[in-house]
Image (spheres, rainbow, N blue to C red):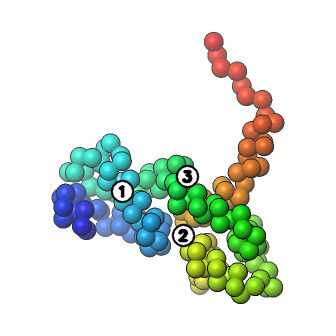
Amino acid sequence: MQHTTETGQKFEPNALDKIWENSQGQPWLVNALAYDACFELLETKDRSIPITVEIIEKTKMRLILRHETHLDQLADKLREERVRRIVEPMIEGTSVDSSINDDDLSYAIDLGLVTRGLDGLQIANPIYREVIPRQLTAITSYNLEATIPRAPFPA
């Protein structure tokens, strides 16, 4: 709302809902989505163009693909064994081991990676649900790329 007051550029109500849906209110993600939508996209530098759901979805993918510092720090946390033991089963669609240490679970929750939802433990927000599997499989992807010959470019 501050941006709208200062610039006149409006956010469509559904766009605000989409920001919440994608971030679940995580402050860095909220700000990153809004900043990219308002200041980085060429088409929205024209303040008469409202910020729409489509623009927020576009900025979400841009954020994920850019490996922003915050998301890189998330990847660093995924290297910690106590975080992996909680997150990996969630990504695999299996249950988190009931013998998980309560301190480890609290740590993952405090980091904002995991939350308690209606269906039990879950990854905290849709952006993390996209970033975490990419991070956990990054080395496998790089190794796979190394084994597949690249197609030659046409001359």
Residue in the image at 64% along x and 79% along y: 107
Tag of residue 35: 1
Instruction: Looking at the picture, tell me which residue is in the foreground, 136 or 17.
Output: 136
For marks 3 and 2 on the same chain, the one whose residue lies earlier in the sequence: 3
Residue tagged by mark 3?
Answer: 67
Tag of residue 77: none
Q: Secondary structure at mark 1?
A: helix
Question: As shown in the figure, which amino acid type bears the numbered disc 3?
Answer: His
Question: As shown in the figure, which amino acid type bears the numbered disc 2?
Answer: Asn
Q: On screen, 32 above or below 62?
A: below
Residue tagged by mark 2?
Answer: 125
State the quadrant of the N terminus.
bottom left
In the visual, does 2 lie left or right of 76?
left
Residue in the image at 63% along x and 12% along y: 155
Q: Is the residue under label 1 in contact with that under label 2 (CB below 8 Å)?
A: no
Q: Position of residue 20 (x, y in %)?
A: 42, 70
